Amino acid sequence: MTGEAQGKPPLELLREVWGRRKWLALAALAAGIGATVTFAVFLPDVYQSRVTVLVDQQQVPETLVRSTVTSAIETRLHAINQEILSRSRLESLIQRFGLYPRLRGRLSSEELVQQMRNDIRLELKGAEAKAGKGAGVTIAFSIFFRGPDAQTVALVTNTLASFYIEENLKARERQATGTAEFLRVQLAETKASLDEQERRVSEFKKRHVGELPQELEVNLATLERLNGQLRLNIDSQTRVLERREILGRQMAEAGFGVPTPSGMPAGPGSGLDPRAARIARLRQELAELRTRFNDRYPDVARLRAEIAALEVEAQAAERGEQTGQAAPPPAPPDPQLLRLRQGIAEADGEHKILKAEEKRLRDAIASVQQRVQDTPLREQQFKELSRDYDSTRELYASLLKRHAESQIAESMEHRQKGEQFRIIEPAIASQTPAAPNRPRLLAMGLALAAGLAVAGVVLAEQMDTSFHSVEDLRSFTRVPILARISRIVTPADMRRRRRRAGLATAGAVGGLALIVVASYGIATYGEVLLALLLERAS
């Protein structure tokens, strides 16, 4: 438009534009209204049903039975939701209830499954763990499903709720059974390891009997007892030797000569010297002292010196006897001699027995002393074996307790005494559709139709380059305008105008009909579009 035309009053300008573009505006408005009304009227109703499921806590007190299912309810619900929304599960529901009959020919199986996933919604309901503090704890949840048929939607919603309940029971039983089976395997492996270590400990005890730490007190007591027996044995030998020495002196005093070690009398100087008996007795005392003291002990040194002096005297006496004359033959034996010989023989036999007992006692003492000396080493070896054995035994006891608890928890889950899902509000067929909101759609459509009409008029005015008045022409050029000739309408112009009006009317009616038919088709087969609208609205 020219600057002069723009200077006209707004109402006059609008009147002129309306006079020129009223049919275009009416056509655009009619098209928008027709499409909106058709779409809103014939758009299929969508119904939504809801089922509320309560999360029942464990029926048996946790102080008595501790559940092995420790995962949070939110985590378990997420896993169950993924299982229920799997392709196989949703395809079976689509086939079972005949869902999406209009979309089956136009969408693939995967797209139908995705459409059903979009139509299912899970909403958690929680409560505060503490008054005003803490994270929310899920105590219930709701399952929503939408579709074109109210009865079918309610059935599908209840079926989905039953799936959640069944999957929760299966998941809890599966987890409880898996935990019990895992502990059963671990218990068997630990039992085998414990048996092997028990075998090693038993073999070690058998191999080192008497050398174990717990037998040290017994060994020390045994060593003390054996030393006491050895002292008594040495004392007994001393007394036997003294008795034999007394018998030998009696034989010498009676003139029978000095008896030999075998008990037979010998000539003068050929018998057992009293010094030999004393040397034997001193040697036994020395041997007894050496069992308790070393060679630097004063009594041990004194006895060694005394024994050495007596041995020197005995050797000197023996050399003097060898240089003398032979002894006269012994006198015939008499009863006294026989008695003395028998006493000496008994003393010699008793001394022999005591010497054998002494050897046995000294061997036993050496064996016990060796055990006592080996006890620290065996104690270290036994500690190494016992450390692993004790830790394995503690682990076995702990696993045995946990396995028993897991079996009780597994039995509780099989008896459905653990945490469960319970429907408190089953889904019912809704009497009113959840979508579409037709008044809202009509209002939006009317607004869009009005905007479309205004936009069409503005666009037509911007594209129109003709002059509609003398003022428009004068504002465009400086050439003086002398006169204005009105349009002369001839009968041919009238016929042409009527023909154009008829064609325009027919075109407008046809276009409107086409728009209505297209809107009807989109509305009747617009479940996907409606789902998108609902998805955005929610």
Image (cartoon, helix red, strand yellow):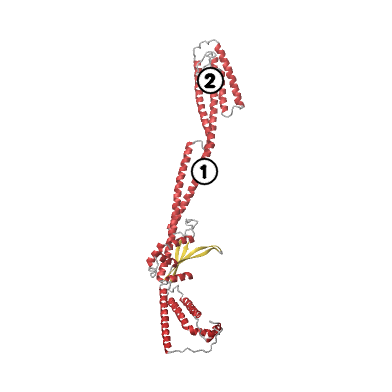
Q: Is residue 229 visible?
A: yes
Foreground: 532 or 170? Answer: 532
Seen as rendered, the residue at the extreme front is 479
Q: At x 50% / y 28%, what residue is drawn?
A: 360
Marks 2 and 1 in Cβ contact (< 8 Å): no
**SS at mark 1 in the image:** helix
Q: Position of residue 250 (x, y in %)?
A: 54, 17
Residue bearing the label numbered 2: 244
Is residue 155 shown above or below 497? above
Foreground: 349 or 368? Answer: 368
Is residue 479 shown above or below 262? below
Between disc 2 and disc 1, whose residue precedes? 2
Disc 2 marks a residue whose amino acid type is Arg
Total numbered labels placed on residues in the image? 2
Is residue 326 shown above or below 200? above
Disc 1 marks a residue whose amino acid type is Arg
Is residue 44 shown above or below 497? above
Q: Position of residue 247 (x, y in %)?
A: 53, 18
Residue bearing the label numbered 1: 387
Q: At x 55% / y 11%, what residue is drawn?
A: 323
Q: Is residue 407 visible?
A: no
- Cα separation between marks 2 and 1: 61 Å
